[in-house]
Image (cartoon, grey):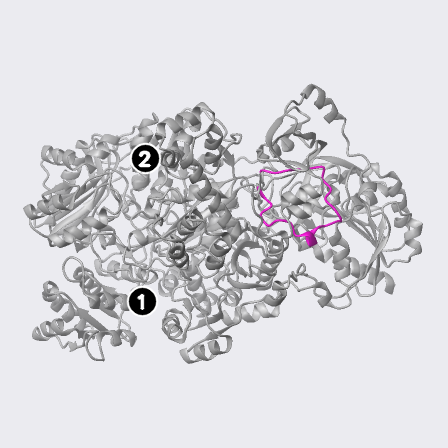
Amino acid sequence: MKAFLILEDGTVFEGTHIGADKEIISEIVFNTSMAGYLEVLTDPSYAGQAVCMTYPLIGNYGVCLTDMESRRAWPDGFIVRELSRIPSNFRKDITIQEFLTQQDIPGIAGIDTRALTKILREKGTMNGMITTDENYDLDNILPKLKEYTTGKVVEKVTCPEKYVIKGARTLSENGPLSGSAKFVPEDYKAGKREMRPSITKSLNGLGKKVALLDLGAKDNIAHSLAQRGCDVTVYPATTTAQEIIADQPDGIMLSNGPGDPKECTGIIAEIKKLYDTDIPIFAICLGHQLMALATGADTFKMKYGHRGGNHPVKDLETGRVYISSQNHGYVVDMDKLDAKVAVPAFINVNDGTNEGLKYTGKNIFTVQYHPEACPGPQDSSYLFDRFIKMMEVNKDA
Amino acid sequence: MPKNPNVKRVMVIGSGPIVIGQAAEFDYAGTQACRSLKEEGVEVILVNSNPATIMTDKNIADKVYIEPLTAKVLEQIIEKEKPDSILPTLGGQAGLNLGMELEESGFLASHNVKLLGTTAATIKKAEDRQEFKDTMEKIGEPCAASKVVESIEDGIAFTNTIGYPVVLRPAYTLGGSGGGIAHNQMELETILENGLRLSRVGQVLVERCIAGWKEIEYEVMRDSAGNCITVCNMENIDPVGVHTGDSIVVAPSQTLSDKEYQMLRTSALNIIDELQITGGCNVQFALHPTSFEYCVIEVNPRVSRSSALASKATGYPIAKVAAKIALGYTLDEIKNAITGKTYASFEPTLDYCVVKLPRLPFDKFITAKRTLTTQMKATGEVMSICNNFEGALMKAIRSLEQHVDCLLSYDFSELSLEELKDRLKIVDDQRIYVIAEALRKGMDYDTIHEITMIDEWFIDKLAILVEMENALKEGPLTVELLKEAKRIEFPDNVISRLTGIPEEEIKKMRYDNGIVAAYKMVDTCAAEFEASTPYYYSVYGSENEAVETNPPKKVLVLGSGPIRIGQGIEFDYCSVHATWAFRKAGYETVIINNNPETVSTDFDIADKLYFEPLTPEDVESIVNIEKPDGAVVQFGGQTAIKLTESLMKMGVPILGTKAEDVDAAEDRELFDKILEQTEIPRAAGGTVYTAEEAKAVANRLGYPVLVRPSYVLGGQGMQIAISDEEIEEFMNIINRIAQDHPILVDKYLQGKEIEVDAVCDGTDILIPGIMEHIERTGVHSGDSISVYPAPTISRTVKEKIAEYTRRLAKALHVKGLINIQFIAIGEDVYVIEVNPRSSRTVPYISKVTGIPIVDLATEVIIGKTIRELGYEPGLQPEADYFAIKMPVFSFEKIRGAEISLGPEMKSTGECLGIAKTFNEALYKAFLGAGVDLPKYKQMIITVKDADKGEAIEIAKRFEKLGYIIYATRSTCAALQEAGVKARKVNKISQESPTVMDLILGHKIDLVIDTPTQGRDKTRDGFLIRRTAIETGVNCITAMDTARALVTSMEQKHEKFTLIDIATVKSRGLKEE
């Protein structure tokens, strides 16, 4: 079946329909990761957006359900050059086609994704429609596209109620340590698939209680802490600061999430209260932006954002550069920072934009990118260790 | 961290002659690195024995030494030039080993020379098998169970604990020389014995066999601050067991989920961090296909063939960045030259798929085993880019220029399903064609996967291509079907063959329906940032990105495709120089080529680079977009020449010598007419199509005769026949591939072979120098030792040669380059062949005479005259030194290849010996080719009857040098009779000790074995030669070569004369 991608500027791409059979309007963004399409699809930060993968061959290794980064897929639509006819990977459960249908996500394949990416790069992120209606009427559609906003999406993606993830008590609970995985033919024949290989080599977080405010969290944030031994309590985004503080966590994590940070006025107010405590805080992505907004800084929308697994980020404390996993359309405005409150701790080597903050006189540091990876490089997982260290120091003090 | 201010004079070590496993990629890397160093104001002293390289040009380095790559020579250069540092990681394994040798001996320390980039300790950790294993164990990175052994007994004992099969890898060898898989004790003993000898340190790794696992590579960069990035990962379609240089490789990996991709990426970064590598590094993994288990196979702490491939696949200039890192820069300080916006610390991301295919030399070595193992056999490779895998594979196949253009190109249709199952077990270069046939016959993916271990994703892609073949065969050819066929890159001629519709009609149907190639940019960032570097690949069904330019003048330069025996790096040298010269003259330059190893495909050589197959259709698509004012074909070897006719049909003027004149040189009748007009003699001969005709001509001329196809390079298929039977045999071989052109049969004349390259402006000619071959006619010119200035021919002969060259160039209306081969018999000169184009000797003669003939030829093509360029026409004054070009072979890599020299070219590369005296030049040339004698002062001579007289003379001279000479029965008798104290040794079939035992005893320096006339049919000679080569014993098959060798050894050469090539000035150039 034919499908069409119609952009706000009137550009129309004709391709083949994939996934669920429905029409959507959404914000069109592109992601440059070459692998990890399932992690992209299940990243709640994509709520309210339709994602175009710049890598042309998608679905090659099918879908392995244990690799999902949240309970479901979130993008409104999926845009690809080509979906693989067969998936090939020892852990695959279903095909990407099946997954999209199951998750009720419509999409379009067979379009010139590079041309689309160039349009978004040049004109900036814009809205679009995916439809199978061959008789689409641009005059009718374009005003509708202009009207669309992602709106308040955090409430949509956060967990409905609080829950606890117990931390590992021994390293072996984390599954095979990356590098020492052994293939057991008997297990494989019995259908016992291997878990994800873990890169965590020490239980330095053993006994720590972490409160994770779920603004649209990817599972690997909690996993990264639990693998290090932390017990993680996950709270819905609407939880009050008071309730979190009452549980007496050793540290608080603010997760990633979708949408315009400035829409989250209520959450920002609560985060300000968390800031005022002495509890160590580590925030990622949306959490980072909300902490900045809560403490008087500003954010702005980038032309087309950072979405991919290849952005270099410089840790200003050490001077080291790490390749990071990124997914954000908004960024903290460095020009409007008050050094008395926070100073830049990380910057993007390519465009010099802010990638993280250190809060003056506080046990708080926040990053714009994704140390939890999935998809993308695991280079920044050391930040979880930094957070654990911070909790330790705070306890000792 | 900014540049280290203490680095001012850097010595760069090149990789030496092109051999299998170490090819043009190091010229690419070295050239890029030298330019990068010079950009930083660093003085570069370059050492490389290979004169065909661009890196040995005077505009690439400040001082250029084309000298043998041995520690002794390097020490002398260091003493003379006093560099403050040395960069050994750009010259492949050869360069790295030399750097290590100088460091370990303490020479560098005592001369205050620093090793730049990766340290010696790191190199040792990465290269020494045991140290590497210990290091990996320390950081928890798994290696396959293995043990380094130094004796056969230890090898057997260890293997008994881990079980067969085992993989054997000798330490410090290139291209996996001497390695292999042993399935039983007998195989173990054979391979191990050989490997122990070939290893520089006498160590071989015995390892658990992980054949069948996925082979995944990561190219990583690390700077001195510890910043790490991965440039690219690659997946070998052929699982572990086939050397990655012989594998079909795809980038990025296709069948790895993010979990596996990141697991291995993290591992690669951990490894280079632990090894403290500064610069580029290649990490190879074996990944279990059905689990997360993996093994680190090996790490190459230097730029490599894979890094060249990764650079071309992503646009990330690894060598350039590695050079900057060596100077002290960190990744976040180095700009990404493609985008100009991002930095070198940005990981490239691809929005296309890259396929690399090896160019294997089995068309040259028809007796060789085609099986692919852990020992690399490919001489070169092609790369292609498309936005789908099928298309990239189809483009790569037709880039090979091996008479293949689709999966039907090798016919296995006669095999039954059962036979196909057996055939699939053979791992060779035809495996994908066998899989395609199995799919046609309905074999299921599981079965194919179980036999080949190739991932089902790739099998499915082959199936998609097979389904398209079927759809085209069944028809009808609808617009939709044609669109889909073009999307996956079926060329028009294949569609035509399958549908039965003429190619022209298919093209028309395409054009009528707008089904044309569009071009996309390789930009390192998947379009996330604007890129300004016009590096393009074609796709169908997309928007064109190639920027339309309308400069005053635009020229298309056709590259020479994959490196193969007969068409090597020399033609890349010519293409690059022509491009530079056109640029200088104000032309916009457009290069088309498909070889990822070369300088010509670096993104900043031409104004535009199209990474595409060199077929008429692919070129036409580019011509439609670029509309060049002309094309030059004379620099790109036979690959480019073959496109002449098509270019003319497209309406593209051929710049320089006209196509009909090129034809006249190849067409027997036309050429004979020209010779008649110009009164130049040649050997009598005729053109034929069939064996019957050939025999008739041969009998008319009298045997021996030379049989060869026309329009080929490197003497492919050329043979000397002495009988009707041999004619039959050779004609059969030649005609296995359909010939468009007739076959030539000439009277074989024996004499001195002379070669000239000249530039002709239509009126005047310029001959930089005359080259004389050491070997008599009968040995291909590319395999002969070539001497400039010609040492043994008279003034009269030289004048005659200059005069004949002038007449021929004029008669053929040459504008640009011409290459002519002559035979001199006494004072008579005959012409053998004329090639109105660039040749293999062009870089060599340019360098040793200081006359940049490609640049001059290009200027002449543009319209200048030789006089206007400042040269007095004619033969230029001779140099006051000797420069000798020595062929280098890779016979040890190709099991079963016949090594004896003949009219068909077999060498893969060359090196230079340059010195004040003939003897020293010769000695250096041999040394550069790896012949470093004497060692044990024992040799074997076994020659055919006709050579016995010369053998006596040569044997006497070796005897005088203290050699003990062993000889087989009749040779021995002849030698003894002449007073040589030869010792008789038994033939292989006779009782022990035989000649074979002697060779295997490893105390033999040299074997001189000339095969019986024509082609050697005796198993004995073949076995002796193969055994010698495979055990690392020098083996010479022509008496002239043997004489040259002994001549070179008759003087002691302790202190060499070192000539800086960059200071060689043309003696004919008029003072301004």
Residue B848: x %, y % from top left: 28, 48
Q: Is residue B699 visible?
A: yes
Location of mark 1 (residue): B1030
Q: Amino acid at mark 1?
A: Glu
Residue B1060 vertical position relative to residue B187 in the rendered view, above or below: above
Main secondary structure type of the part rendered in magenta: loop
Toward the viewer: B943 or B959? B943
Q: Magenta span covers which residues?
A: A57-81
Label 2 sits on a secondary structure element that is: loop
Q: Is residue B594 left or right of residue B336?
A: left
Residue B41: x %, y % from top left: 49, 47
Label 1 sits on a secondary structure element that is: helix
Location of mark 2 (residue): B643
Residue A37: x %, y % from top left: 64, 46
The 10 Å Cα crowd at callout 2, few under 14, some 14 to 19, many 20 or more, is: some
State yes or no: residue B863 in magenta. no
Q: Is residue B706 left or right of residue B75?
A: left
Q: Is residue B628 visible?
A: no
The 10 Å Cα crowd at callout 1, few under 14, some 14 to 19, many 20 or more, is: many
